[in-house]
């Protein structure tokens, strides 16, 4: 490995070096305190545009987390709908009327001569 | 590289969009901070951070696992920042905004040890922010190679080995750039503040 350091260069004392490092870290501390920008949205948008719609075109690929709340709401809505249908259609379902199964009266006809 | 990491990289190489989302969520903030430190401007940094991941998405099939994934992403980020810096330098698009911000400032000794993280004294806060702006401007004025080495070593706190992997230059060269960068930065800061920082 080649060390490019020129021996004639002045050396930096430890105190200056520490102070300089402190100043550099202080100078860039601000973005750590702030919220970082939403990099993901921008990346998805760029990839969608540049791939001509090959990537990140459907809604599922661009979401960050599985939409649990959507699943729950959809499930509950379906349950409510099914209950409604059951109760709404129940009166229409009807019941078989009990048929009196008595033998029809038989009229005896006497044969005439 | 463990099995989980290998499987994750395989998913990335198969262009699994959900895996890529996970990658950006994991490394996005770190990459943003790095490029902000390299470029010195937020708007530029946000766009550049996005560009880094677009390049990673394109080139992930070339990742062989010889280095850590984070190191490889850092390398992409550093190279893109250098290219952008050269491009901006050609256009003479220097940090005029930063110059305006440092037009008036308090002496450094009054802001000693204070950054804008300290909010207990509003007057110290303002002084600290002025010093931060001056230092950022001075770092932006450094030679790109010096700036890169200083940011990676003194701000990102990376080891020499990691810097060697990211920059692709010899360890001696890295050490030399850090040393020269510190000297250059010290001179710039002292000139801007009109006093010694020792």
Image: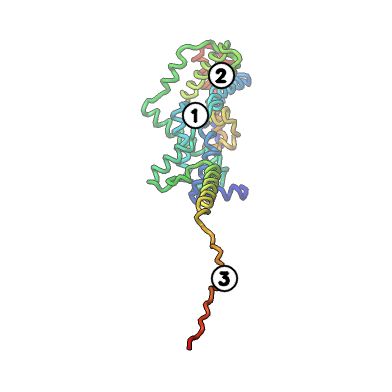
Q: In this orientation, does residue A51 appear? A: yes
Whole-percent x, y for residue B49 in the image? 47, 35
| Residue named by callout 2 | B116
Up the image or down, B74 lies above or below B189; here it is below
| Residue named by callout 3 | A102
Up the image or down, B87 lies above or below A94; here it is above
Q: Secondary structure at mark 3?
A: loop
Whole-percent x, y for residue B13 in the image? 50, 50
Other-residue count near label 2 (Cα within 10 Å), few / some / many at <14 / 14–19 / ≥20: many
**Chain ID at mark 2:** B
Whole-percent x, y for residue B135 in the image? 51, 20
- Seen from the viewer's position, the closer of residues B36 and B195 is B36
Q: Find out whether the residues at labels 1 and 2 contact each other: C-beta distance under 8 Å.
A: no
**Chain ID at mark 3:** A
| Residue named by callout 1 | B36
- Seen from the viewer's position, the closer of residues A103 and B120 is A103
Q: In this orientation, does residue B22 appear? A: no
Q: Nearer the viewer, mark 1 or mark 2?
A: 2
Other-residue count near label 3 (Cα within 10 Å), few / some / many at <14 / 14–19 / ≥20: few
Other-residue count near label 1 (Cα within 10 Å), few / some / many at <14 / 14–19 / ≥20: many
Q: Secondary structure at mark 2?
A: loop
């Amino acid at each position: 490995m080649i060390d490019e350091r020129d021996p004639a260069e002045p050396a930096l004392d430890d105190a200056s070096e520490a102070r300089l490092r402190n100043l550099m870290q202080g100078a860039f501390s601000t973005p750590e305190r702030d919220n970082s920008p939403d990099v993901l949205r921008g990346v998805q948008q760029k990839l969608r545009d540049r791939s001509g719609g090959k990537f990140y075109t459907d809604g599922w690929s661009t979401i960050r987390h599985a939409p649990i709340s959507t699943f729950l709401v959809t499930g509950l809505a379906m349950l409510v709908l099914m209950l409604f249908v059951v109760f709404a259609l129940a009166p229409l379902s009807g019941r078989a009327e009990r048929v009196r199964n008595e033998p029809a009266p038989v009229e005896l006809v006497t044969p005439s001569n | 590289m463990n099995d989980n990491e290998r499987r994750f990289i395989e998913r990335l190489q198969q262009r699994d969009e959900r895996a890529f989302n996970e990658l950006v969520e994991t490394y996005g903030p770190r990459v943003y901070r790095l490029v902000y430190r390299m470029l010195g401007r937020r708007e530029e940094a946000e766009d550049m951070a996005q560009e880094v991941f677009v390049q990673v998405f394109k080139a992930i099939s070339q990742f062989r696992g010889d280095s850590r994934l984070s190191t490889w992403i850092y390398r992409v980020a550093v190279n893109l920042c250098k290219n952008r810096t050269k491009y901006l330098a050609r256009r003479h698009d220097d940090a005029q905004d930063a110059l305006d911000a440092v037009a008036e400032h308090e002496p450094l000794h009054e802001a000693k040890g204070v950054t804008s993280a300290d909010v207990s004294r509003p007057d110290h806060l303002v002084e600290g922010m002025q010093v931060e702006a001056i230092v950022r401007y001075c770092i932006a004025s450094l030679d790109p190679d010096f700036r890169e080495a200083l940011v990676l070593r003194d701000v990102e706190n990376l080891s020499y080995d990691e810097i060697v992997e990211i920059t692709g230059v010899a360890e001696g060269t890295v050490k030399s750039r850090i040393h020269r960068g510190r000297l250059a930065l010290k001179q710039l800061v002292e000139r801007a503040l009109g006093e010694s920082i020792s």
